[in-house]
Image: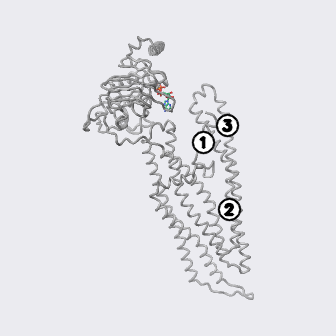
Amino acid sequence: MSTAQRSMAARPSRGGHGQMRGRMEKPESFGQAMKQLGRFSKRYIPAVIVAFAFGAVGAACQIVGPDWLKRVTDAIAKGMPAIVHGRPVMASIDLGYVERVCFVLVGLYVGYALLTYVQSWIMATLTQRTAQGLREAISKKINRLPLRYFDRVSYGDVLSRITNDVDAIGQTLGQSLGSLVISITTFVGSLIMMFANDVIMTVVAIGSAVVGGILMMAIMGVSQKYFVRQQIALGDVNGHVEEKYSGHVIVKAYSGERDSIEQFERYNQDLYESGWKSQFLSSLMMPLMNFVGNFGYVAVCVVGASLAMNGKISFGVIVAFMMYIRLFTQPLSQFAQAFQNLQRTAAASERVFGFLDAPEMADESDKRALLGRSADGSPKPVRGQLDFEHVNFSYKPDHPIIKDFTAQAQPGQKVALVGPTGAGKTTMVNLLMRFYELDSGDIRIDGVSTEDVPRWNVHDQFSMVLQDTWVFRGTVKENVIYSKQGVTDEQVVSACQAVGLDRFIRTLPQGYDTVLTDDTSLSQGQRQLLTIARAMVQDAPILILDEATSSVDTRTEELIQKAMDALTVGRTSVVIAHRLSTIRDADLILVMDHGRIIERGTHEQLLKQGGFYADLYNSQFASTELLA
Ligand SMILES: Nc1ncnc2c1ncn2[C@@H]1O[C@H](COP(=O)(O)OP(=O)(O)OP(=O)(O)O)[C@@H](O)[C@H]1O
């Protein structure tokens, strides 16, 4: 992987690095993404409107507050002593009026707090409900997607949509929409109130906000450059550590430590420089904004004082403007934040809906389950006869992978697929299980075409033991039973006894109820045995064995082989064989190369033919001999 690619891969796209840092995520079409999100959560729209109304009324309470403060200030100022002819003359303060105004003020501020609280509560609930709904829709969608989809999109990408993207929507949507409503109302409302009070003072307040805005933009412009560099440097450091950590044995073996350390130091220095500059510039922001804010107060006071002296405004107007200037500038930074959050929401929604809109597998609700059931619906055991008839298949158009594959397996037979890597063995198994649809030809189980029955009905006829053992977080018992219904404890124990795992399980702290985690580490061989026990419990009529190529010790290998042999008894089995010694007893060996069957027969027949299989067998046999 090149450095640039690694940087892209390792670069965290969000989280933990502040809102303004890094590049802003941009959706391809903001309007389209928000429309889709709106459509998805349309049943919440009435509640959102109610929440907006609460937010707007709450903000309005806050906006009229300073106007009432102006009245109380004027009332107090009117009652202040004045100096007439060098002597103080007491006027009287209308305390009743002051008290009434104070009650109104308290009411307004309590109203503001309560209404915005209710708005936040509604928005948080709706956003989390939407996120929950999206996760549910994604999880259902995964089961309806054809496997072909995952040839193009990695599982990691899908996982990231369930976790990161839905999480981003959950975190940003409610906050940004809520604060957008409040800040728009506050901004427009305070502008109206300021103009209503005094035009000159309003111009002064706007002027000082504009100066602050320009300064903020200038600093953000410069610091943004360093934040982007910091993200790239962080990606380089992470990528380098990850790469060298995962390959540390090779690094040591090839004495690559010095190069590795030098490279790391270069990345680390880059990170230090860009990190320092971006942090320094952003830390300038606060003091500078405070300075501009204070400058605004001073401007309002100076201009206000001269207007008051000329009797153009009352003293209370100056006090009101001191508050309006804060209410008016606050939403400006909130706009930027809310806008950025909404962009993130839209970008995340675009990815989530891109996934939710992906074409699904054809609906099969009209197909009847014919495997394992007779015409009247009563159970009828599947015998396991397999017919492959002129099967052709390609993952990508015009790149045929399986070419005219024709073969038959009788019930209970063991069929082995052999061939060099990339020959198409795994693909054939995928086709047999109808994970993919054929380009042409037919695959039949007991004479029933797998295309004529629902996919689940096909899958039910198979047990699989694959190279990649899958053990999930759960007890040993749950791992063995997996999705099978009505399995008794005795069946679990007898399957584990049959594969020779019972004794080991009993040594675990809670025996069969021990939860398998990374700490309860099972060896590769034990994991294999566990999956064989799982297949035994599933007790399906057809078995797929993808032989493990991973190195286990000879004794475990023997155990696994014995367990697999026990499993194949009475079932049709399709074995992808890597060591030819294990399939000497197969009823039919199909030798594949470039998607075609090039030889077929039993072990003896193929050896006698002296073709590809015989060469392969002899070369493997010779290498075993050598090793022995
Ligand atoms: N999901 C996929 N998308 C596109 N091409 C694929 C996909 N899976 C496999 N192929 C290609 O199909 C061909 C056959 O692959 P397949 O995995 O069936 O071979 P195999 O015989 O099982 O090999 P191995 O013994 O290495 O597992 C290969 O050329 C492979 O690159």
Q: Please report whichever mark, 3 or 2, sits nearer to the chain's N-terminal start.
A: 3
Q: Amino acid at mark 1?
A: Arg
Q: Is residue 613 above or below residue 507?
A: above
Residue 384 x, y percent position in the rendering:
32, 28
Q: Is residue 111 above or below residue 432?
A: below
Residue 71 x, y percent position in the rendering:
61, 78
Q: Amino acid at mark 3?
A: Glu
Residue pointed to by mark 3: 265
The local secondary structure at tag 3 comes to helix
Q: Is residue 220 above or below residue 570?
A: below
Q: Quadrant of the N terminus?
A: top right
Residue pointed to by mark 2: 290
The local secondary structure at tag 2 comes to helix
Q: Are marks 3 and 1 in contact (CB under 8 Å)?
A: no
Mark 1 surroundings within 10 Å by alpha-carbon count, few (fewer than 14), some (14 through 19), many (20 or more)? some
Give the residue drawn at x 65%, y 83%: 78
Asked if the residue at label 2 sits under 8 Å from ligand 1, the reply is: no
Depth check: give the residue in front, 401 or 563.
Answer: 401
Residue 11 numbered mark, or none: 1
Q: Are marks 3 and 2 in contact (CB under 8 Å)?
A: no
Q: Please report whichever mark, 3 or 1, sits nearer to the chain's N-terminal start.
A: 1
Q: Amino acid at mark 2?
A: Asn
Residue 232 numbered mark, or none: none
Residue 12 location, quadrant: top right
